[in-house]
């Protein structure tokens, strides 16, 4: 999608050197647009852990590039062991999004039992393929979700109000986004859409990133404090909720940014459709109980105690809370499948239950039957 009218993706191989990966530094948006160079596997680990890159599909592809960069630096004689070590190091950077493990495992699988020279070129080829697939899948998610927005527009004959939480936009992916892709596709088709953007404390990915990308695309939107959605729903101001997912079980439970569950409860109470947009790389085919089986990341409590903003031409961080008060920082929550109206995937829309998900993805049978 566009920044200042120029098309960007979130991550790419440098044009100057094929030993450097470049990514948009999301810690600085919307105030400063800066590109980060990733030259080593440690750079990749730090970029994911510190959330310079974030969002489930994007950390997956960044992790895949991490394997490639690690191979460039390899000079030992036990390649398979090295691949395993690097893979588990990278996977430990953030625990909740399954895309990270998925993409890393895909790259490692293709590189095993190769010479180092072959492994390097296979890793880059596979990463590029995975990246292109994510773009294609997000575009398809957009087309499927567009039908929902179009249906509401035809019925209500006024701009469609979509509420979203966190940033499940193109910045969280490679391009298009998941939750925002249907909005972009609708807008491109001339359907008027307005987005309610949850600010998404504590890191404010909604206020800083979703709002930024919608503004750059010229999509009407309004940033709201996280606790506003229920009120808007009670007053008919929300037609549809679309969020992303960091990990969805094969039975349809959805882990997404903390606060998603409360939006799902409010949507359910007000009979408002609550959809989750996700590529199949966000489905964990091996688990069925989101509450007990999805690891929930706990981040540095100081992210709650302090807030970042723009003052005197720089990003500053200021204290919000009393110094003597404790803070807790759970990164994600799990929305049970019963609160999810449907999943918008690259293959179409399905119910959030095992039968519908597995019927849509029969080729994954070997994974859920393990
Ligand atoms: O902690 P973050 O910013 O990585 O969390 C991102 C989200 O929760 C997104 O909604 C999710 O990754 C889906 S991205 C298409």
Image (tube, rainbow, N blue to C red):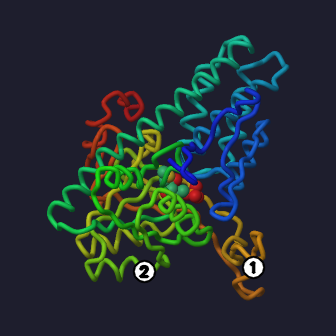
Quadrant position of residue 204: bottom right
Tell how many labels: 2
**Is the distance from the Cβ of mark 1 to the nearest ligand 1 atom less than 8 Å?**
no
SS at badge 1: strand
Q: Residue at x 78, y 24 (%)?
A: 72
Give the residue number, with chain letter if any, for mark 1: 318
Residue 292 visible, this orientation: no
**What percent of the width, then of the height, locates residue 158?**
22, 69
Image coordinates for residue 231, horizontal then vertical, percent? 35, 83
Q: Which residue is mark 2?
A: 228
On the rendered structure, is 327 left or right of 137? right
In this view, the residue in front, 242 or 313, is 313
**Counting residues from the N terminus, which is met first, the one under dot 2 or under dot 1?**
2
Determine the residue positioned at 85% across, 20% down.
Answer: 75
Percent x, y of residue 312: 78, 76
Question: Are there few (<14), some (14-19), or many (20+) residues within 10 Å of tag 1?
Answer: few
């Amino acid at each position: 999608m566009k920044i200042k009218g120029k098309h960007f993706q979130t991550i790419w191989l440098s044009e100057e050197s094929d030993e450097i990966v470049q990514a948009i530094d999301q810690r600085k948006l919307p105030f400063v647009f800066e590109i980060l160079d990733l030259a080593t596997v440690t750079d990749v680990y730090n970029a994911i852990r510190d959330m310079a890159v974030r969002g489930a599909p994007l950390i997956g592809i960044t992790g895949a590039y991490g394997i490639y960069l690690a191979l460039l630096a390899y000079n030992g004689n036990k390649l398979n062991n090295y691949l395993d070590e690097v893979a588990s190091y990278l996977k430990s950077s953030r625990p909740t999004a399954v895309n990270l493990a998925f993409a890393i495992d895909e790259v490692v699988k293709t590189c095993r039992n190769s010479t180092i020279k072959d492994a390097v070129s296979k890793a880059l080829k596979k990463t590029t393929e995975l990246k292109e697939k994510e773009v294609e899948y997000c575009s398809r998610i957009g087309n499927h979700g567009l039908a929902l927005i179009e249906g509401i527009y035809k019925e209500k004959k006024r701009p469609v109000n979509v509420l979203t939480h966190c940033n499940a936009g193109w910045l969280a992916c490679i391009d298009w986004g998941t939750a925002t892709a249907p909005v972009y596709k609708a807008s491109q088709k001339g359907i008027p859409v307005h987005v309610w953007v949850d600010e998404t404390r504590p890191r404010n990915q909604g206020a800083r990133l979703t709002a930024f990308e919608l503004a750059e695309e010229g999509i009407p939107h309004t940033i709201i404090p996280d606790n506003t959605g229920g009120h808007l729903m009670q007053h008919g101001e929300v037609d549809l909720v679309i969020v992303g997912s960091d990990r969805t079980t094969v039975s349809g439970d959805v882990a997404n940014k903390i606060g998603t569950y409360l939006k799902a409860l409010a949507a359910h109470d007000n009979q408002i459709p609550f959809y989750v947009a996700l590529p199949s790389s966000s489905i964990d085919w091996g688990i069925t109980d989101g509450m007990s089986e999805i690891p929930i990341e706990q981040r540095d409590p100081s992210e709650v105690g302090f807030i970042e903003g723009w003052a005197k031409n720089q990003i500053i961080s200021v204290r919000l809370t009393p110094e003597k008060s404790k803070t807790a920082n759970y990164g994600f929550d799990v929305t049970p499948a019963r609160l999810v109206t449907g999943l918008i995937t690259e293959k179409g829309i399905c119910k959030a239950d095992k039968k519908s998900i597995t019927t849509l993805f029969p080729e994954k049978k070997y994974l859920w039957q393990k």
